[in-house]
Image: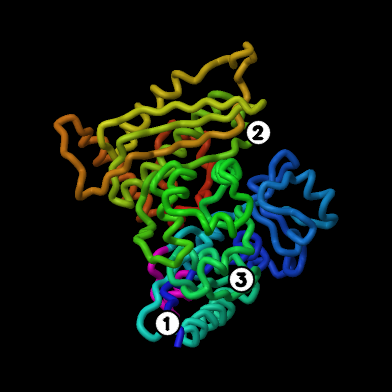
Amino acid sequence: METALKWLFLDLNSYFASVEQQFNPRLRGKPVAVVPMLTDNTCAIAASYQAKAFGVKTGTLVRDARKMCPGIQFIEANHDLYIEYHHKIIEAVESCIPITSVMSVDEMICELRGSERTLERATEIAELIKKTLRKKVGEVLTCSIGLAPNRYLAKIAADMKKPDGLTAIFQHELPARLHSLPLRDFTGIGEQIEKRLRQAGVYNSEILCSLSKEAMRQVWGSIQGEHFYQWIRGIDTDQSHGENKSISHSHVLPPEFRTREGASIIAQKLMHKAAYRLRKAKLWCRSLSVHVLFVGDYSFENGMKMMETQDNFSFLDALQKLWSELPKRDEQGGLLDRPIKVSIWLTDLVPEQEHNLSFFENEKGLKVSQKLDEINARFGKGSLYFGGVSDAKEAAPNRIAFTAIPDLDAE
């Protein structure tokens, strides 16, 4: 009996669009695209399978989607709704099998144990998950599930059949089972790695799978190549997930905030939200970065190292210093007065148990920030906020970063 299945990977199909169709029965069976705002100058962040049939996908411009798919309906993203459904899905899956790690808003992985590692039992669990999701969350929400000897291949297996698929990859099939996949179907092979592979004479997956461990390390330029060699052979190396390497927030600016002052206000609000998440995760930050994209594709990025901190005041002071270096003109002398997107990153994060105490910590600032969290948790998000972002109180609402799902109380 085959017992090499160790992991179950679950991938929700067209998650944002499916949630909208589940929430609003009028949209079911129709081509739908979820967009950040209702304007022709933006692009789809998700598409239903009915829209995908016409070629509409994530990144398709709204104006192009209208031409490709007559009758398509555009829905402004409701991220609080997606978070709400996400937690319902977690609860439903947990009633079938413990979740080892939540990978993103629409992906999670579960370790199979004992008899669960047989194809028969793993398949029963997968079918139970699908049935439970339909019953407890909604009949429109489907998922594709992959079963494999390691986490990496379980994700690959989940991608092999969509929507509503179930695929198993066994140890004895490897790596030949992967020979038919396009190079870009391998998680971790993006444009740059594919370019390096082609320069090395690798034009298909069969050649890729024949490379030695040393050759893969050379192509990747890091130990990641060695990891890839092991993963496609079913070796279950440590692929721990969920460790916070960064906390970030980005926002496409509404038209009324597409000024330097407006972008600054939005950046401050994003900063407060990131600081809240940092404290909730019991992490400390040692590096802050800001990115601003202007009309015409000119972008500005700046960052700085910091003393380990959690408090809003230290972050706002650092943000102000970074923002002061925002150029007024581009290299050709063009005026940079129309920003369209702002991003904030907190990086170089340290767990609380590894935090180094310092005489220079802003204890008062941290206590005020923590009290702010407590009040908003008790009376509702936005009950208390910094005066500098009052003009943007309704702007920059919760957005889901695919590797970090905010709580409904995140402000």
Q: Which residues are magenta?
A: 90-101
Label 2 and label 3: CA atoms lie apart by: 34 Å
Question: Compared with residue 244, is residue 49 higher up or lower down, i.e. above or below?
Answer: below
Measured from the top left, where is residue 326 in percent x and y? 49, 20
Say whether residue 10 is left or right of residue 306: right
Q: Which residue is mark 3?
A: 141
Sequence-wise first label, 2 or 1: 1
Q: Residues within 10 Å of mark 2 (few under 14, many from 20)?
A: few
Q: Amino acid at mark 3?
A: Leu
Q: Amino acid at mark 2?
A: Pro
- The residue carrying mark 1 is 3
Q: Percent x, y for residue 240?
A: 36, 59
**Amino acid type, mark 1:** Thr
Q: Image height check: is 352 above or below 391?
A: below
- In space, the residues marked 1 and 3 are separated at their CA atoms by 30 Å
Is residue 407 something that shows in the picture? yes
In the picture, residue 336 is in which quadrant? Answer: top right
Q: Secondary structure at mark 2?
A: helix
